[in-house]
Amino acid sequence: MALDLARMFGGHPIADPTALPPARKHYVLVPPAPESLSLTAAGDDALVTELGDALRNCVYALQRLASLIDSVVAPHVADADPDYDGPIQDEAGQDSGSITIVLPAAATLGEAGYSVTSAFCGGVLSLARTLAIELRRQHIRVNTLMVDQHLPGVVASVATQVTALMSMPGVTGQEIYLADGLDCGRIRP
Amino acid sequence: MSAPVAPVAIVTGAGGAIGAAIATRLAEAGHLVVAADLDQVGAAATRAGITTGGGRADACRLDVGDQASRAELVAGVLDRHGRIDVLVNCAGILRDARIGDLTEQTLLPTLAVNLIGPLSLARQVIDPMTSEGGGSIINIASRAWLGIFGSASYSMTKGALVGVTRSLALELGPVGIRVNAIAPGYVQTPMSASLPPQVVRRSVNATPLRRAGNPDDVARLATELAHPQSFVTGQVIAVCGGRTIGQPGMAEGTAS
């Protein structure tokens, strides 16, 4: 059950502001979740460092990624009212870009012994939902993949799904599970 | 002859509107309630309301974001009352910004009060609850866990509470500890009074039951979740007048 997604897929360390990735249209964020950590084993200091700091780093990483995507929308339009329910592409059918966040499926669904990891995943999932709502006026799409790391050919499956999401205009705020179906019968968070 | 032993319930944020309503209902259901709040005057008022009505209550100062204060609360309750059966993590703060404007000034207190504090208290009550053969942990989350404009750090901490609720329920079910979350929609309280009026109007208009929630709507559900015979665990239950199922409408011809 190792929560090794970040290492599995590689990428830039998100805690380090000097490691800014180059400006791109599409980003994939694999935030490092606290490893198999249960609340029963996590003292207050561990909660602050393993959970609080990890969530803060994730907020700042997403803040930077969103700012790196050139918005195709003029700023005054982007700042429009919170009720914005208009299109998320310009007249030429272009969006500004997308962010795909990858989380471990097991801890997101809930797993005994992983309560702090699940807190992290739940926090990032809700953050992604809020960002999908906030960034749609800038025509930036935010989707989340929940990945079972033990799927055969998991890296290729994730790459296929991520690539597909990049070229799906209009699709935002969605949560896709890449899993083997043993989660059927469970309510998703 | 000694009085029958009452189950002991800790309610954080019990000086606030929702916390006070939960504390009051739990006392009516026979709990000895420990009303904990940073606002000692508010906590004392909640205790006074309960004892005047014939219930049993105690009031404590708690800075939920402070490690020493949390430890002191749990030790004090065990010292004075000998057991802990119910923990309601109700204390929370609403302080937020859109993602681009989020700074440490918002993030740090929101994480400390809405997430680290509740999780720390949950951990500290596990052993006392296990000794009593079980218990009920109730985390007051928010509809914001489903995503809400301008609320990146608040929704994140509430989503994290939901996440921990699910895994902890799986882990602690076998020892009889149930863990649930309540996700209220817009509830009229002094805390939510800081929201702009157009936000409130929009919220009520988007609610099938066409009203704002009140603290007792949350308190009645919390009391059921606290019931020792409850078969409910690991759930996040929305108390939102149906807002989370979509936009209300009116079918053609049914308008009067």
Image (tube, helix red, strand yellow):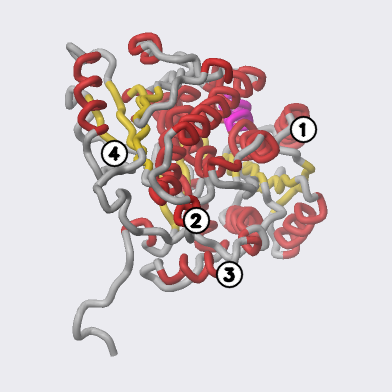
Helix, strand or loop at label 4? It is loop
Report the span colored magenta: B119-128
Amino acid type for the residue under numbered disc 4: Ile
The mark lying in front, picked from 3 and 4, is 3
Q: What whole-number distance in Å separates the C-alpha atoms at marks 1 and 2?
A: 46 Å
Amino acid type for the residue under numbered disc 1: Ser
Q: Is residue B164 visible?
A: no
| Image marks 3 and 2: residues in contact by CB distance under 8 Å | no
Name the chain under label 1.
B
Q: Which mark is residue A158?
A: none
The residue where tag 3 is placed is B197
Q: Is residue A167 left or right of residue A143?
A: left
Residue toward you, A14 or B47? A14
Q: What whole-number distance in Å separates the C-alpha atoms at marks 1 and 4?
A: 36 Å
The residue where tag 4 is placed is A187
Main SS category, magenta section: helix
Instruction: Tell if the residue under mark 1 belongs to the same chain as the one under mark 2.
Output: no
Q: Is residue B67 visible?
A: yes
Q: Is residue B159 left or right of residue B102?
A: left
Q: Quadrant of residue B115?
A: top right
Residue toward you, B191 or A74? A74
Residue B165 x %, y %: 46, 34
Q: What whole-number distance in Å separates the C-alpha atoms at marks 4 and 2?
A: 40 Å
* Placement of A121 over or under B93, stated as above or below: above
Residue B33 x %, y %: 67, 48
Is residue B68 one of those drawn in magenta?
no
* Placement of A153 over or under B95, stated as above or below: above
